[in-house]
């Protein structure tokens, strides 16, 4: 595993608070890290991945505000510079992604093209 000196993505204060809340849940597995990534699919071609997962040999590690994070090395070209926000309103609730690498995004905010 390789540790990055600088986080390739940023988390807003709202996202940090929500992630730390989830990490403090009783059933949380402390061996998991926050995984940021992409996978094929969605209406624009690629979909964001944000969840807790174990390290693999394809991963790089970094930390944001005390949150241990991981990302597949190959995903950096899609995600470097991206900001993750937490929307806690009644109409839209969940994580949103602002990605400067996306050439096209969809209305739901979870799918993009490069």
Image (cartoon, rainbow, N blue to C red):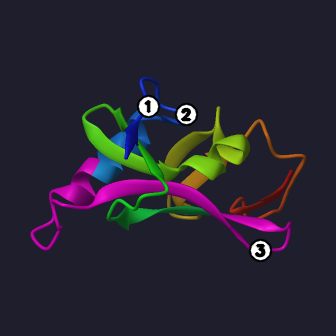
Element on which disc 3 rests: loop
Which residue is labeled 1 in the image? Answer: 4
Q: Eyeballing the image, is 68 above or below 31?
A: above
Farthest-out residue, top: 5
Of the two numbered discs 1 and 2 in the rendering, the one whose residue sits closer to the viewer: 1
Distance (Cα) linking label 1 and label 2? 8 Å
Provide the residue span drawn in magenta. Answer: 20-47
Farthest-out residue, left: 26
- Visible in this render: residue 88? no
What number is the disc on residue 8? 2
What number is the disc on residue 42? 3
- Visible in this render: residue 46? yes
Rendered residue at 37%/54% (across/down): 34
The answer to which of marks 3 and 2 sits earlier in the sequence is 2
Specify whether residue 32 is painted magenta. yes
Q: Give how far across and how far down residue 114 sits, in percent.
A: 86, 50
């Amino acid at each position: 595993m390789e540790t990055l000196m600088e986080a390739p993505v940023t988390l807003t204060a709202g996202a940090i608070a929500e992630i730390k809340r989830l990490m403090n849940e009783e059933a949380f597995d402390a061996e998991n890290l926050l995984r940021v990534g992409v996978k094929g699919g969605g209406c624009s071609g690629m979909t964001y991945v944000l969840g807790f997962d174990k390290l693999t040999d394809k991963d790089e590690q970094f930390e944001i505000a005390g949150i241990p994070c991981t990302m597949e090395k190959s995903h950096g070209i899609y995600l470097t510079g991206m900001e993750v926000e937490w929307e806690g309103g009644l109409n839209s609730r969940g994580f949103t992604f602002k990605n400067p690498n996306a050439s096209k995004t969809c209305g739901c905010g979870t799918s993009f093209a490069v």
